[in-house]
Image: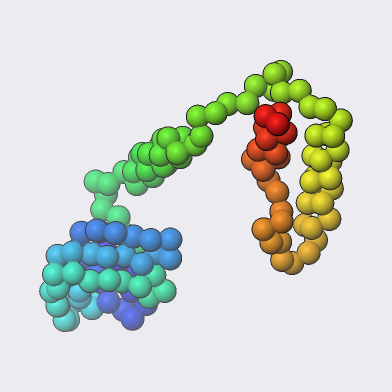
């Protein structure tokens, strides 16, 4: 059950929910909190900014549901990661590569104070790609 800021209660089956707490429900019953008026809908989109409170039925273990969702998301994240593993022992750097890395790190520390960071910024994967390109050539 979702309690709305306009003193209505909405009950239904959650079909979707997003990061802004917008909720798409099906088989919806909307009533006033005093139960004076009741309306039925096949579907309803409840905007997150209109939600006062969300009540879960006692038979739903919300903590288990969240843990299951997190496990699923972690599994999907791992599937999408590159298969290439860099062995630190086999990664040897020459002095030119070390200077490039130092320049990148110094450049990034100077850029952290600036408001806009563009496409010229590098992350760890960019550094590893640069090292790999240098070793291949």
> Looking at the image, is 87 positioned above or below residue 8?
above
The image quadrant of residue 98 is top right
Q: Nearer the viewer, residue 134 or 30?
A: 134
Residue 48 percent location from the top left of the image: 39, 70
Residue 93 lies left or right of residue 15; in this view the side is right
Q: Which of 105 and 97 is in front in this view?
A: 97
The image quadrant of residue 75 is top left
The residue lying at 70 percent from left, 49 percent from top is 122
Residue 6 percent location from the top left of the image: 33, 81
Residue 93 percent location from the top left of the image: 79, 27
> Looking at the image, is 23 positioned above or below residue 134?
below
Residue 83 lies left or right of residue 94; in this view the side is left
The residue lying at 37 percent from left, 39 percent from top is 72
Colour pattern of the rendering:
rainbow
Q: Which of 56 and 95 is in front in this view?
A: 95
**Quadrant including the C terminus:** top right
């Amino acid at each position: 059950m979702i309690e709305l800021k306009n003193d209505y209660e909405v009950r239904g089956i959650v079909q979707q929910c997003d990061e802004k707490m917008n909720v798409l429900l099906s088989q919806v019953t909307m009533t006033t909190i005093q139960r004076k008026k009741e309306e039925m809908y096949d579907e309803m989109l409840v905007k997150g900014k209109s939600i006062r409170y969300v009540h879960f039925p006692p038979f739903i273990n919300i903590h288990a549901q969240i843990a299951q969702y997190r496990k699923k998301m972690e599994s999907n994240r791992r599937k999408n990661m590159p298969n290439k593993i860099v062995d630190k022992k086999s990664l040897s750097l020459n002095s030119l590569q070390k200077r490039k890395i130092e320049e990148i790190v110094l450049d990034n520390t100077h850029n952290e104070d600036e408001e806009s960071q563009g496409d010229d910024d590098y992350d760890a994967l960019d550094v590893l790609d640069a090292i790999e390109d240098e070793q291949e050539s």
